[in-house]
Amino acid sequence: MSGSLETTDEIAETVVTALEDYQLLSITVVTENADDPEAAVKGLVALHLNWTEENRETATLIARHRNEVAAGPLSERLMASNKEYFASMKTWIDRQSENGRMPPVSFNLMHAVTFAPTQEIAKLAIAGRLKKPLPEYAEALGNAAWAGLRALPGRQRDPVSR
């Protein structure tokens, strides 16, 4: 992103476009690793760290303005993108659990275990509090995310009625 954004509309457009693009990249990671959830989870962690490293200004805008953008004129566009993203990720999670490759966890739990530590380290980097580049944390955080997901008990599903 070059130059500074002047208006609320420019900020909102930048935030929504960046989130849409990031969500598509995330869907690509799980699609390309459809039969390997470990690689997918580690890929999602690496994506987040690499993307933040390469897009610090945009990442800062998202962190600072996401809630107001979600409540503003572009809220429907953002909700539509989120809906597609969540559906794709839920489908991927369900497919992995049905094939016994990972516990049947909810999207919210999967997201929290995978991204909370990753987002925290990204915030520290954006604040200038880390000495190493963000991508150097990808292996350790990816391993931790995968181990965390594997340690979770599966959610209970209602039997399918026939």
Image: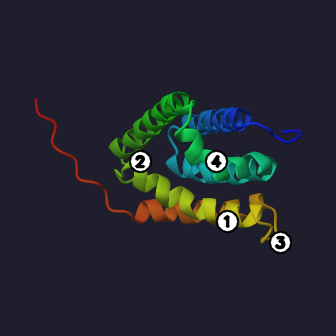
**Mark 4 vs 3, N-terminal side:** 4
**In terms of secondary structure, where does tag 3 sit?**
loop
Mark 4 = which residue?
Answer: 65
Marks 3 and 2, how far apart in space? Answer: 32 Å
Give amino acid for label 1.
Answer: Ile
State the residue at coordinates (62%, 59%). Answer: 119
Q: Looking at numbered disc 3 in the image, what kind of residue is underneath it?
A: Lys
Question: Of all residues shown, which one is farthest toward the front?
Answer: 7
Which residue position is annotated with label 3? 131
Reading the image, the residue beneath label 1 is: 121
The alpha-carbon separation of the residues under discs 4 and 2 comes to 24 Å
Quick check: 148 above or below 93?
A: below
Q: CA distance from mark 3 to mark 1?
A: 12 Å
Amino acid found under the numbered disc labelled 4? His
In the image, 65: left or right of 30?
A: right
Q: Earlier in the sequence, mark 4 or mark 1?
A: 4
Q: Position of residue 65 (x, y in %)?
A: 64, 47
Q: Residues within 10 Å of mark 2 (few under 14, many from 20)?
A: some
**From the image, which quarter does the C terminus lie in?**
top left
Instruction: Tell me the number on the disc at residue 107.
Output: 2
What type is the residue that disc 2 sits on?
A: Phe
- Which circle's residue, 4 or 2, is located before the other in the chain? 4
Mark 3 vs 1, N-terminal side: 1
